Amino acid sequence: MILLPAIDLFEGKAVRLLRGDYKQMTVYGEPLELAEAFVSAGAEYLHMVDLEGAKSGETPNFEIVKKIAQTSGLNVEIGGGIRSEETIARYLEAGVSRVILGTVAATDLAFTARMVRRYGEAIAVGVDLNDGLVAVKGWTETSGLSGLAFCKSLEEIGVQTIICTDIQKDGAMNGTNRALYQTLSASFTMRFIASGGVSSMEDILALKELNLYGAIIGKAYYTGAIDLKTAILAAENEA
């Protein structure tokens, strides 16, 4: 299982939200310095979200993402406000490995299918769930679309990688929703990356047992609850 430390961007800084609430934001520092620290700990992957872009549909932190993608050596995936092919192409040309479609995937499945046909594995979809329903526009709205039904539609159009977040668990440091990921892993053939509430080594080992493709570590890294180097070694260990 791969581990992806996370950098959420707001006004050029690395921040974390509690359950997606922009009013409950903690600033953790400079994104470039954090990326260097992740590399030093043995990370090969990086999950990034442009929180401003998630609400506006724009890319205000593009230059930071580009610099990290081109200089860190990390395989970078980016989400937040990616709602056009022009934005997808800009990120991929900047050296990003994978772009994550969120709101546009929930509202325009035909567009998502075209992008998957055109860019293949470089397209992932973020399935952000609030009480089992898909949330959109930076988690500020709920679509009314069932998470399982949405995943089925995504599998049918050829999406290979899903980043699934339980919003109620995100940033709360009270454990991840293992039952959700067990259901997803058993129901679909896509690669799932768990996000939200991964707050202990126990969580990481439990997700690995479910044969998930990956897990994202956010607040647990920033608070010191998880040592990234130790976690990466545990996730990669085949024993």
Image: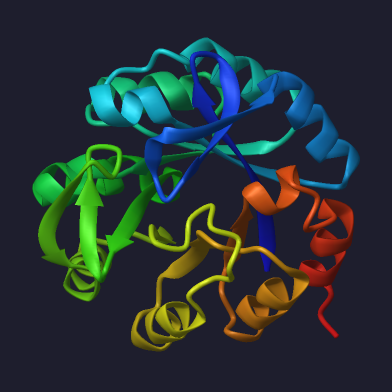
Quadrant housing the N terminus: bottom right
- Quarter of the image for residue 66 reads top right
72 relative position to 52: left or right: right
Q: Residue at x 68, y 61 (%)?
A: 2
Figure quadrant of the C terminus? bottom right
> In x, y percent, where is residue 158?
28, 62
- 143 horizontally vs 140: left or right: left
Position of residue 213 measured from the top left corner of the image (x, y, whole percent) = 57, 68
Residue at image location 86% in from the left, 64% down from the top:
233
Q: Nearer the viewer, residue 29 or 134?
A: 29
Q: Is residue 102 above or below residue 162?
A: above
Task: Please determine whether, in this image, residue 5 is positioned above or below residue 28.
Answer: below
What residue is drawn where x is 23% and y is 31%?
A: 83
Residue 224 shown left or right of residue 131 in the figure: right
Q: Is residue 82 above or below residue 135?
A: above
Can you give x and y, in whole percent of width and height, for residue 41 in the image? 88, 45
Q: Nearer the viewer, residue 214 or 196?
A: 196
Q: How many marks?
A: 0
